[in-house]
Amino acid sequence: MSELQQWDSNWDGRQPKEGEAKPTATRVIVLIRHGHYHDKATTDADAFLTAQGRQQARIVSQRVVDMEWKPSRVVVSDMTRAKETLEILMKRLPLNTPAVTIPELREGRPCQPVPPSRSGVYKKASVERDGKRINEAYDMIFHRAPPEQKESSHEIVVCHANVIRYFACKALQIPTEAWLRIGLAHASITIIHISPNGKVSLKALGDKHYLPRHLIS
């Protein structure tokens, strides 16, 4: 189990050594949960967005467009509900916006939550499998800017509730077992800033103020 600890300034393994060039840009990670979907489906293909989910996706897409920045790229899970949310978002973004699929972002159980879920302790094998994969996705996305990056960047990540709340805990270096204590609405936005010196700050967690009350789920 994790323990509260001193801040690890070299958490991404990219802290410059004496005499090496230092980063100067900030990386902003904008995590968006997919829209409402058919959660009783037994296959991923059938777990597609509902009409409510598609409306949520359109609204959060407009929210992104209204922000005072353009994304450097968009990253998405390969699950149907995330890809459909991305398709709606991409219609609002500049045509040249790069989009990358990272299968490791698929929904899962990143670690055993404390306290346990209402359904009890998760199977050890599934947690170890999912946790390894989700941590690999984290390492791909979360790191300070390289020294050659001169301007701040905004990267959109469209994925899943468990993944996002686990990422938030891990990025802040607080016990990751707390992830299940966080609630995230569909089509909500979580924003994490990674400063040039490697410090991390949470600017928004599950923001959904732009959604009409009747669409919040």
Image (cartoon, helix red, strand yellow):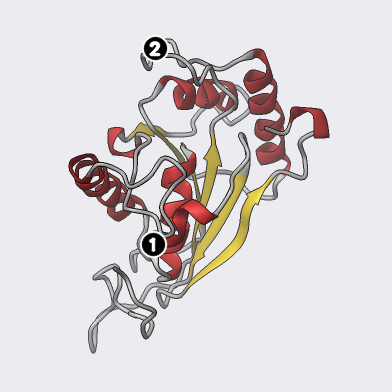
Numbered disc 2: secondary structure? loop
> Residue 149, can we see it?
no
**Direction from residue 205 to residue 148 in the image, left or right:** left
Asked if 17 appears above or below 78 in the picture, the reply is below
| Residue type, label 1 | Thr
Residue appearing at x 35%, y 62% in the figure: 143
At a point 56% along the width and 64% down the height, the residue shown is: 202
| Residue 112 visible from this viewpoint | yes
Coordinates of residue 42 in the picture (x, y in percent): 38, 14
Q: Nearer the viewer, residue 83 or 170?
A: 170
Residue 171 picture location, percent across and down? 42, 64
On the rendered structure, is 91 left or right of 11? right
Return the disc, 2 or 1, that comes first in the chain's sequence: 2
The correct choice, above or below, for 110 with respect to 35 in the image is below
The residue where tag 1 is placed is: 176
| Front-lying residue, 150 or 181 | 181
The answer for how far apart the CA atoms under marks 2 and 1 are is 30 Å
Question: Outermost residue toward the right?
Answer: 213
Judging by the rendered image, the residue that carries numbered circle 2 is 45
> Against 100, is 115 above or below?
below
Give the amino acid at mark 2: Ala
Instruction: Tell me the crowding category of disc 1: few under 14, some 14 to 19, or many 20 or more residues within 10 angstroms, Cα based.
Output: many
192 vs 19, left or right, is right
